[in-house]
Image (cartoon, grey):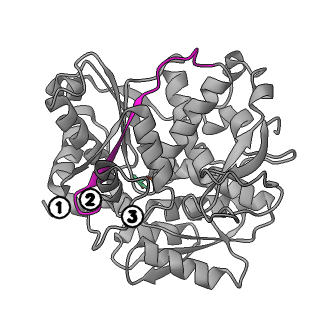
Amino acid sequence: MGSSFFTHLECGNTCGAGPFDPRERHFLCPACGLPLLARYDLKAARSWTKDSLAGREPSMWRYREMLPLLPGDDPVTLGEGFTPLLHARRLGGTLGLDRLFIKDESLNPTNSFKARGQSAAITRARGLGATTIALPTAGNAGNAAAAYSAAAGLKCEVFIPRDAKQPFVDECRLYGANVTLVDGLITDAGKMAAEKGKPLGWYDVSTLKEPYRVEGKKTMGYELAEQFGWTLPDWIIYPTGGGTGLVGMWKAFEELDAIGWLDGKKRPKMVTVQAEGCAPIVRAFEQGTEKAAPWEHATTAADGLRVPRAIGDFLILRAIRESGGTALAVSDRQMIDDMLAIGSHEGVSAAPEGGAALSAIRRLAGDGRIKKHETVVLFNTGGALKYLDVLRAT
Ligand SMILES: *Cc1c(COP(=O)(O)O)cnc(C)c1O
């Protein structure tokens, strides 16, 4: 493989530092401490054609020209991506929506869309000579990192809050990772991973502190465009923690526009959904600020949404605002009811995060903001199986 248009890294903030050489390890911007983003030769990429996708593997690596591969690299892959886009007619019917779709990310390796990010990140980590991967996680990112590390023949050190659900801890161990239970939240786990790992040279794949997970997750944007015949939906409803997927999809739409694959068609409105018990992005959106203050005493059954502070907050807020979207918080009660609504109407296994996306659609359709004929994509970011305790508790 090879033939990617990947050229360099640069600061994703207005500081604009760079270019940085991707043949060396880079994490946050050395000038301002904010995330770095991968850049491609978009002029050269205009020679790439949609026809070339025909017959390619049904995984996210079908878009390898716009993924961070260097000459000689082979992806670390378990078949992630190219997940079904289901027309949810029965569920849509209950909401008065003709064109509700579910992007079912639960069918990825390790049961969530975290697989996409880790496939890209661990591909680069291996290319850069890493021997040990480390990360803090609420659960799914750790499972994916453990699996892709195993596939790449690397060691994996996972730092997870002590109160995380047991299946997440067990699955890390299944893939041979070493698990450290941390008192506190994912932010505390992140501090511990960095302190322990720095002197040992561990390669830290924390969300957006490492520039390649977002590249894997952006493929959700490429896929939506391809699956909708190179048009985009009116609305994307995305349960947001660290925000990598939302930031990634917005980046994907910019890239697709730049290489001429979207004919200047209108971009979707991006909607962030968070839990009432942890909604820093929603609060910042409502207050009109550029960054989000940390959320105190974060609690929610949706582990992926229990992120009190996101380093990419300004990128999330920028994408929501540029798109004309919005941000809203839903209760745990409602999101668990909506896991069941997705399951019972569509036969799809939804994590509480996926349930939360439905709760948001319910409200936006009820308020008349989403119209009957509009095309809406609900991101079911993970499956229900690791969260079944929340169903039993109801
Ligand atoms: C991590 C996670 C999220 C949040 O994703 P971000 O891209 O970090 O915002 C949502 N849902 C599930 C199931 C997750 O595992």
Query: Label 1 neighbourhood size at 10 Å, few (<14), some (14-19), many (20+)?
Result: few
Q: Answer with mark 2 or mark 3, whichever residue precedes in sequence.
A: 3
Query: Label 3 neighbourhood size at 10 Å, few (<14), some (14-19), many (20+)?
Result: many
User: Circle 2 sits on which residue?
Assistant: 388
Question: Given the image, on which type of amino acid does mark 2 rest?
Answer: Leu
Q: Answer with mark 3 or mark 1, whichever residue precedes in sequence.
A: 3
- Residue placed at 63% from the left, 60% from the top? 210
Within 8 Å: ligand 1 and the Cβ of disc 3?
yes
- Residue placed at 62% from the left, 45% from the top? 215
User: Circle 1 sits on which residue?
Assistant: 392
Q: Tell whether 349 sits left or right of 344.
A: right
Q: Mark 2 near mark 3, Cβ–Cβ under 8 Å?
A: no
Q: Is residue 324 above or below residue 148?
A: above
User: Circle 3 sits on which residue?
Assistant: 307
Q: CA distance from mark 2 to mark 3?
A: 21 Å
Asked whether residue 106 is in view, the answer is yes
Point out the residue furthest to the right here.
72
Q: Nearer the viewer, residue 317 or 133?
A: 317
Q: Mark 2 near mark 1, Cβ–Cβ under 8 Å?
A: yes
Res. 52 image quadrant: top right
Q: Position of residue 38 (x, y in %)?
A: 69, 47
| The C terminus - image quarter | bottom left
Q: Mark 3 near mark 1, Cβ–Cβ under 8 Å?
A: no
Q: Which mark is residue 332?
A: none
- Residue placed at 78% from the left, 37% from the top? 4
Within 8 Å: ligand 1 and the Cβ of disc 1?
no
Q: CA distance from mark 3 to mark 1?
A: 24 Å
Depth check, mark 2 against mark 3: the one in front is 3
Question: Given the image, on which type of amino acid does mark 1 rest?
Answer: Arg
* Magenta segment main secondary structure: loop
Question: Given the image, on which type of amino acid does mark 3 rest?
Answer: Val
